[in-house]
Amino acid sequence: MIEIRNIHHTALQLCPLKKLVEKYARSLKLRRDVVVVFDRRLTGVTGGLHRLNYKKDRHVIQIYPECEGQTDEGALKYGLVTYILHELKHAQQEEVHGYSYHNSNAFSRVTEIHDKEQSEHYSRCETEARMYECKHIHNAVDFYNAEMIS
């Protein structure tokens, strides 16, 4: 199940975005439900963050609804879709690696990682997520635009 919350904070439309998230969650073979929350209270994070809600067994992707310095609607769309793709990849990484994906509280704070192995793991996960978003951003936005028209 895909759930989108607070979309009114963005210029995006619910149905095309829901179909987009569903398509990429399915292509990443995510087994858990996905909730995307556009949250203006998100601070100290550039773009978004992923966490697994163990109690409800679902991925929660929080996205800051505005892209810094962007006022153009098209650029905002690209920015928000990029963040969603990036965090969906992290959701897949968590499902694949399990608890070892976040094996300490310091993992999410790159400046606090002093363990070389953990730092390399963090870098590898981030690199994979960035490569995934770069590879799919244009097709994802094209898919979103096509769904808006239909």
Image: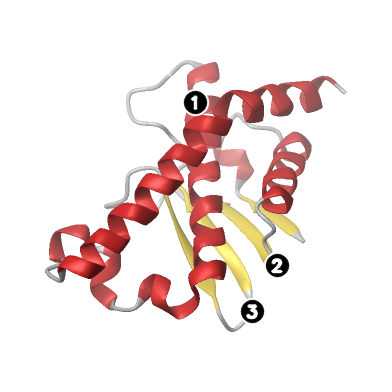
The residue tagged with tag 1: helix, strand or loop? Answer: helix
Q: Can you tell which of label 2 and label 3 is closer to the viewer? A: 2
- Mark 2–mark 3 Cα distance, whole angstroms, equals 13 Å
The residue tagged with tag 3: helix, strand or loop? Answer: loop
Name the residue nearer the viewer: 13 or 150.
150
Tell me the quarter of the picture where residue 150 sits: top right
What residue sits right under mark 2 in the picture? 31
Q: Residues within 10 Å of mark 1 (few under 14, many from 20)?
A: many
Q: Can you tell which of label 2 and label 1 is closer to the viewer? A: 2
Q: Report the amino acid beneath label 3.
A: Lys
What residue sits right under mark 3 in the picture? 56
The residue tagged with tag 2: helix, strand or loop? Answer: loop
Query: Compared to 141, does 92 lie above or below?
Result: below
Residue beneath the point at 70% across and 67% down: 31
Left/right of residue 37 with respect to residue 130 in the rendered view: right
Asked if residue 138 shows in the view, the reply is yes
Q: Counting residues from the N terminus, which is met first, the one under dot 2 or under dot 3?
A: 2
Residue beneath the point at 53% across and 56% down: 61
Tell me the quarter of the picture where residue 137 sits: top right
Q: Position of residue 15 (x, y in %)?
A: 78, 39
Left/right of residue 56 with respect to residue 14 in the rendered view: left
Name the residue nearer the viewer: 110 or 39.
110
Q: Position of residue 79 (x, y in %)?
A: 47, 30
Query: Compared to 81, does 127 lie above or below?
Result: below
What residue sits right under mark 1 in the picture? 76
Q: Position of residue 13 (x, y in %)?
A: 70, 33
Residue beneath the point at 67% across and 61% down: 30
